[in-house]
Every structure is written in C-alpha cells, then in structure tokens.
Image: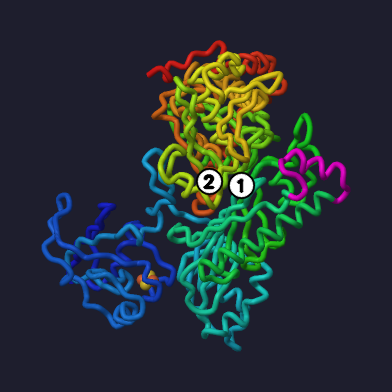
Amino acid sequence: SKDAHIVFTPSGKHGDFPIGTPVLTAARNLGVDIDSVCGGRGICGRCQVVAGEGEFAKHKIVSSCTNMTAFSSVEERYASKKGMKEGRRLSCQAMIEGDLLIDVPAESQVHKQVVRKRADVRQIEIDPPIQLHYVEVEEPDMHHPSGDLERLFSALKAQWGLTDLHCDLRTLQTLQPILRKEKWKVTVAVENQKTIIALWPGFKEKGYGIAVDLGSTTIAAHLCDLQTGNVTASSGIMNPQIRFGEDLMSRVSYVMMNPGGDKEMTTAVRESLDTLIGVVADEGGIERSDILSMTFVGNPVMHHLLLGIDPTELGGAPFALTLNSSIHLYASELDLNISPDGRVYILPCIAGHVGADTAGVILSEGPHLQDEITLICDVGTNAEIVLGNRDRLLACSSPTGPAFEGAQITSGQRAAPGAIERIRVDPETLEPRYRVIGSDLWSDEEGFAEATKSSGVTGICGSGIIEAIGEMFLAGIIQTDGIIDGSKATVSPRVQSNGKTFDYIISDKEPIIKVTQTDVRAIQLAKAALYAGVKLLMEKLDVTTVDRIQLAGAFGSHIDVKYAMVIGLIPDCDLERVKSAGNAAGTGARIALLNKKARKEIENVVSKVEKIETAVEPKFQEHFVNAMGMPNTVDEFVNLSK
Ligand code: FES
C-alpha cells in the first residue's frame, strides 16, 4: 500500500508512513515531542493530538479525521472515564489512513510547558529530573528463572528504552508485593533516566514535588505537579527557630553559648517542615508517598541548620561555609517523610553571607542571561546584593540591621493590620495623612475611624517608615544631613522637641505614633549600608548606572520604589525599571524542582559569581559615609527630578 504524508504542527516536522502506522509511532520517528506515561496503552491520555485540515508550507493537506482510523474501543473507554475535548484523539491509538496534518497541543508536549509566564523573565520549560513510566512486566517462569527486578529492567528497556538502571533499596524492598498487586502492571518513578526511586501498583497518573523557601522568619512550601508544573497547594509557617533568636546572628550566638543548641534548632526546623509537608499534601488531596522530590533555598545559616551542620563558623570572619556546592540527598536523611526514597536538592550557596536563597533569586530573575545591567537587592536584616549581566556577576552582602523590618524603630512594628504603610506629608502645613494595613481609606477620609476600629492604628511597618522619612525629607522636616529641623516647630506642633532633639508626631492619639531623630538615624545607617554595598559592586563592575533594579523579598514587594530612591536606598535608575521581584527565591526553588537543566545552570552561574567581602574593602566606609546624606552627599539622582 502507498505511504501517507504526515505533517506535525507546531514543530513542522513531516514524513511519509505506511497506512496503519499509529500516529504516536510516526511522531516518535520524526522526533516530535509527545508526552506519555503509559507507553501507548491508552491509559494516561497524555498523548492527545488534534487532526486537522489545512495547508502547511509546501504540503497541501486535503482531508482531516477521515484519514485516521475511527475512535477505538480503548479511546472510547478513556473518553468515558476521563473525558476528552472535542476533536482530540489518543495518538497511541489513532492510526494513519491517509495524508494528515496533526497538531500537538501544548499540554501534550513534554518540554513545551513553562513554569511561569512573565514577559520580563525568560520562560522555563518543564523538564523535571523525575519521570513516571507505566510498564507491564513478565511473570516469573520456573523454566527461565530470573529476578523480579531484572524482569522490570527488561520491561523498561523494551517499552521505554531505558538502560543501565538501578533501584534504590527502600523501593526494592517493596518490589515483590507491588508487582503482584495489579497483575505485573506497575508505574515506576525514574530519576535522571537511571534510578528507580518509587513504585506503584497499576497505573499512576501523577507525581509531585515541593519547593521550599526556608526563611529565617517564615518557611513557605509549594506543592507542584511534576508534569504540568502547576502549584497544587501552598502554605507557610513561622520558622520555629525564632524562639532561639529573632535574627540569624542571635541564632548563631545561641549555638555558641548553648552546647547542642544547633541540634535543637535542626530538630525544630525539620519538624516544622514535616508538618508543612502534611499540610500541603492534605490541601492538594494527595498522599505523602506521592511526593517524590523537594528543593530548598535558604540563607547560609538556615542551610546549615537544615543539614544539621553547626553554623558557628558563619558567625564571624572569614565566614567560611562548610560547603558551597549544591547537595543531593534522600529526604529521609533530613527526617522528612515523603516517598521513602524521595529526593532533596538544595541549591548552591554563593558565599558565607550570600546563600542558596540568592542563588534562587538569580535563577528566577536571570541577570546572567541579559546584556543590560541588573541590580538585585534582597533586603532583610542583611541585604544580599547581586549586580551584573551575562558577562560578569558580582555579589556581596551588607549588614543593614533590623531597621527595615520595623525593629528598633520607636513606633515600628511588623507588617500587620493597624500598621501604617502609606503616608503623605503636606509640605505647607506639615500635616500627615496615612493609610494602615487592612483598610483602603486614608486617615483624612470619611469612615476611616470606623474602618480601622477593629485593628486601631498601632505603629509603622518597615515600608511605612521608608515612606514617612521620604515624605518628611520632601516636606523639609528632615534636612539633607538627616537632622529633624527644629525650626519647623514654629510651623506645626507636629514637630516637637523632646529636650535634646526633635520628633515628628504622626498620630497623637494613644498609642502615639512618631518618628524620632534616633529612628531617622537607624534608617540612615541601614540605607547607607545597602547603598554602599551597591556602590562597591558598581565600582568593581566599572559602571556608573544600572539598567534595571529588582527588589526581592517581602520588604522589596511592599516598598514604594519612589521613596526608596528619595532617601537614597537604591541607586539612581529609571523608576519604571525598578520592580518588585516578589518571592523570587521561592520561584527559583520551583524552577530547580521542575527543570533539571536549571540545576546545572545555577550551579554553573554560582561558580562564576565574583564574591566581594564588604568588610575588607577600604572604599566601603567612604561610600557608607556619603550615603548617610539624603539622598546622598555625592551621587546625583537625575531620575528623581523627572
Ligand atoms: Fe498513554 Fe496514549 S500514551 S494514552
């Protein structure tokens, strides 16, 4: 019989095949990417295609579905059980009867889905290290004795082309009952096409992974479907290590003062993680054993404590890490209860102060893929700073202290209902108006008192304090040297003497909310530390401006970038190009979970990042002193006057 001409879209791959060839076979032959877990048995439904008419390049296609065999009983069964969209066919069942144009929809293409769609960042294809394969294994035969595992290997070779396999011990221990449960039909999870890490009787549709952002304050976990990349459930909890110390250095001191303190903190964080796994598994409606892999990002201290490594060395110069490369482990080694041979991947650290969280931010924001100069600042009690482009990337950290988090600020508080987050100061009257978290109304709008009755107005959060100081500066209450101008007391009673210096009263009702000279100093010190770090990197990179700025972390996502620039916290840049990167570290963990090449990529990039130690750089002090001024004593901010 004559051959039929087959064209696949969107790849454009085409060829001639004998009538009766299954569409999936033709696709495989041409190297067209079509997904499959069941190996062409009409069970998984991953191989769906659409037969269409039309013209493709030089190839005129004359007819449509009539050139495929009719719906088979296998397809009927699948469609009635799981449902199938109009016009769809299972490519493993439909056979070629004549010339055809066949479209492979995005969800049937293994490598064409993306972790996220954001115009300003590259798209990451879904290509996880762990894949599921359904196989039918031969039964044992007295006349040809062979092990169950060897017959499983032969089946995986014959049906999936997998060779040189081995099997993890805990999975091996379950092999015999699982093989026999569903009459020698099993689904196998294979890592890197080499290692069997889990087994299920019969057909198993989905495997899962969890990406974790292990922060010093909160731990966030995202349960992801390993095939689609979709986040099935997300949850977060407070890091229980807080009871050993608010910030990182106090936790390191706890270890230094209390023998065995590191063990306590390791146990605490692992227990919370295990609880969190249970929460997202419940929310996603899956079993813990369905979770095959986890990825982690976190700062060096969190990283060491998770691994059960004493972080004492990170407490002082030269801040040596135990290791900076990435780590592959069994989840069981971290006491995490997922699939028994489930895997953990921890992203690499960059330096003693710049951890796997920053590696996650780089992976997510991709400064190393661009020509333009990107500045990334992740601001917490320490600021991690990354600057550069595809040619060079530099990183450093700078001790900003807790001021940006509202700590050690007279009226400072955590971002919670009742905290002032937005503020404007009238430059004539010096009267403030503000908005608090939990209400959309400004303080001078009707209904404000009612709207804030339950929370009250309780303090100022970290982003609110930046805005307050920025507005006070713009209104002339704060001078370029950071001093609150006492002569303004004659303009408004809101500027008040406290005997030595002056305060600015935002709210005179209980609790009184004010900005003191000490508060302004604390913010000046914090912003100068950040700016000096940035400036140092700019000098090393030999650039005088940056093209775009990404602010990572919780602080970065709440702050109004205009005020960050007004007080000189970030360098001069087109304000349109200053963006919040949101939870970029967590996104980095998710990318590493879903794309095996991304792991290699970040390992590679991190190994080339140039680390700058601010403490030993003579110019740091000079930049720091200049950055104490508002917005800066020497640097101009041309974008502010635009
Ligand atoms: Fe699984 Fe076609 S390959 S249904």
Spot occupied by residue 93 in the image (x, y as percentages of width and height): 31, 74
Seen in the picture, residue 174 relative to 382 is either above or below; the reply is below
Seen in the picture, residue 371 relative to 210 is either above or below; the reply is above
Seen in the picture, residue 53 relative to 424 is either above or below; the reply is below
Q: Quadrant of residue 538?
A: top right
Residue at figure coordinates x 46%, y 46% from the top left: 439
Seen in the picture, residue 441 relative to 141 is either above or below; the reply is above
Residue at figure coordinates x 23%, y 62% from the top left: 102
For mark 1, what is the residue? 297
> Which of marks 2 and 1 precedes in the sequence?
1
Q: Give SS at disc 1.
A: strand
Q: Quadrant of residue 348?
A: top right
Span highlighted in magenta in the image = 243-260
Left or right of 429? Residue 505 is right
Left or right of 638? Residue 139 is right
Q: Are the two marked residues, 1 and 2, in contact with CB atoms closer than 8 angstroms?
A: yes
Q: Looking at the image, which is closer to me, 547 or 18?
A: 547
Task: Please tell me how crowded label 2 is: few (under 14), some (14-19), or many (20+) other residues with Cα within 10 Å.
Answer: many
- Quadrant in which the C terminus appears: top left
Q: Give SS at disc 2.
A: helix
State the predominant SS element of the stretch in magenta.
helix
Spot occupied by residue 328 in the image (x, y as percentages of width and height): 65, 53
For mark 2, what is the residue? 588
Asked if residue 257 is among those painted magenta in the image, a careful observer would answer yes
Label drawn at residue 626: none
Quarter for ligand 1?
bottom left
In this orientation, does residue 170 appear? yes
